[in-house]
Amino acid sequence: MTDITDISRTVEAIYEAESRRVLATLIRLLGDFDRAEEALHDAVRAALEQWPRDGVPANPRAWLVSAGRFKAIDTMRRQKRFDPLESIGDPAEVLSTDPLEWTDEESVEDDRLRLVFTCCHPALSPDAQIALTLREVCGLTTEEIARAFLTPAPTLAQRIVRAKNKIRDARIPYQVPQRDELNERLDAVLRVIYLVFNEGYAASSGASVVRHDLASEAIRLGRLLVQLLPEPEAMGLLALMLLHESRRAARMSADGDIILLEDQDRDLWDRTQIAEGVQLVERALRSRRVGPYALQAAIAALHAEAPAPADTDWGEVVGLYDVLMRVEPSPVVELNRAVAVAMRDGPAAGLALIDALIARGELKDYRLLHAARADLCRRLGRVDDARTAYTRALKLTRQEPERRFIQRRLHELSR
Amino acid sequence: MKYLCLVYLESTKMRAVPDSECMACSVGLRDSGVLVAAEALQPIETATTVRVRGGKATITDGPFAETKEQLAGFYLVDAENLDEALEIAAKIPPAREGSVEVRPVRQLDA
């Protein structure tokens, strides 16, 4: 009896470690997501039956792929609808290939990358890209994803079904994009990962525990991508996520109130994550192909490395925002730069830049612009202007902790 | 003179007419020499839209959304997969003014 329990524990551990790889390879071999998922389940069931009797095979991954593929082909033969996509080649050829050949490290990692790019294909809606990536690449259940995104499970299941149908019917290719379109497609993958991260990171109340898992899931995805495709921007994004995540324990009080960067207890920052993030930033910057994620990560690294708020190198922060404005100009970057200028040159200098943004009609409904303006007015002693701007920000915010933070500030002003 | 005959159906009636009947119709038209090309399409959920602005192609899920845009022409192309089809679609000149919807053709179950 102990043996069987041991074996099922072994199968479980192998499943945990290998199921996403096995799935990625089965999708390539069988040319269909649903068929591959079914094959994976059949293979695991077979393992639970056979391994206690015959022992765990030397290469469990190859065994699972082989068993899954065999079961799937068997099913297809019985259903007489063996119509694989052309991309997977001649069925006879697939049948004759040695399982060890298509489960070696290199082709398996290629398959994982194919899976990531297919799930993040721009022909799928952004919501579908996120759901499909979490389902297929990360192996989260539909219920887990639904809970994390506060979406009803049937809606989410429907979204995933629709995406898989489109992949099949519109014939979205299972491949890593060519070099000439790789950068653009990589941007789409990075955006999906960052959206997943922000969904978890911004979680503030209620189901926050589940939602924090999204941040860790995004970091895992980021790690996978850096390992499979060590492009500077992939490193930049991973660094950015790690550096944000390192402050998680310090950015909220026990009551769920926001603690600003300058007021955070820096002893609570996760040094291991900071070290890893900083190292990745340096690698990305050395590549000399610096993109927006690496630059934002470099800015986050400057904050992370300052022992106290007063030690922050604001000159350097402003310099990095200048580069970011050249690489990817946007009003939000301009606003962040204005705040950094205020720290370097004083609140009046920052306020002038923010007022210039307002004069151009930019970001007039962006709550953080009004919150930043309010803070600078407050520092300058312009109490009435500060109050007006905080009130504006309060009207625009939908997050409860932000609302409480602004109300606290308004209360302080009226004292 | 060539004429394009566009077939419209509610999504629930996509399969209301048997494929065999459609097939018989197109064979009949081909035999009589009037048919240039005819295809059934996959449902609208499989559609992808390409727009080219400033020389850069943007790809989005779904059919065109601009109500002001009207059907202005069509290309029936043979591509290996959706990526190839989108690449071709991005080269169709009106893609830079309006949009090009790319919808896969469905094989009739004869």
Image (tube, grey):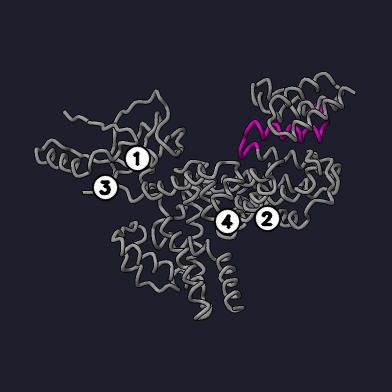
The image position of residue A57, as x and y in percent, is: 51, 78
Q: CA distance from mark 1 to mark 3?
A: 12 Å
The image position of residue A33, as x and y in percent, is: 43, 55
Are both tags, 1 and 4, on one chain? no
The boundaries of the magenta stretch are: A325-349
Mark 2 chain: A
The image position of residue A368, as x and y in percent, is: 71, 31
Q: Nearer the viewer, mark 3 or mark 2?
A: 3
Chain-order first, disc 2 or disc 4: 4
Q: CA distance from mark 1 to mark 4?
A: 34 Å
Q: Is residue A368 above or below residue B88?
A: above
Are both tags, 1 and 3, on one chain? yes
Q: Are the residues flagged by discs 2 and 4 in contact, CB closer than 8 Å?
A: no
- The residue pinned by badge 3 equals B107
| Residue A331 among magenta residues | yes
Q: Nearer the viewer, mark 4 or mark 3?
A: 3
- The residue pinned by badge 1 equals B43
Give A400 or A133, whichever is nearer the viewer. Answer: A400
Q: Nearer the viewer, mark 1 or mark 4?
A: 1
Q: Is residue A369 above or below residue A102?
A: above
The image position of residue B74, as x and y in percent, is: 29, 34
- The residue pinned by badge 4 equals A225
Amino acid residing under circle 4: Leu
Q: Are the residues flagged by discs 3 and 2 in contact, CB closer than 8 Å?
A: no
Q: Check the picture and name the quadrant holding the N terminus of chain A.
A: bottom right
Q: Is residue A110 left or right of residue B31?
A: right
- The residue pinned by badge 2 equals A280
Which element is circle 2 on?
A: helix
Q: Is residue A240 visible?
A: no
**Residue visible at 22% across and 39% down?**
B38
Q: CA distance from mark 2 to mark 1?
A: 45 Å
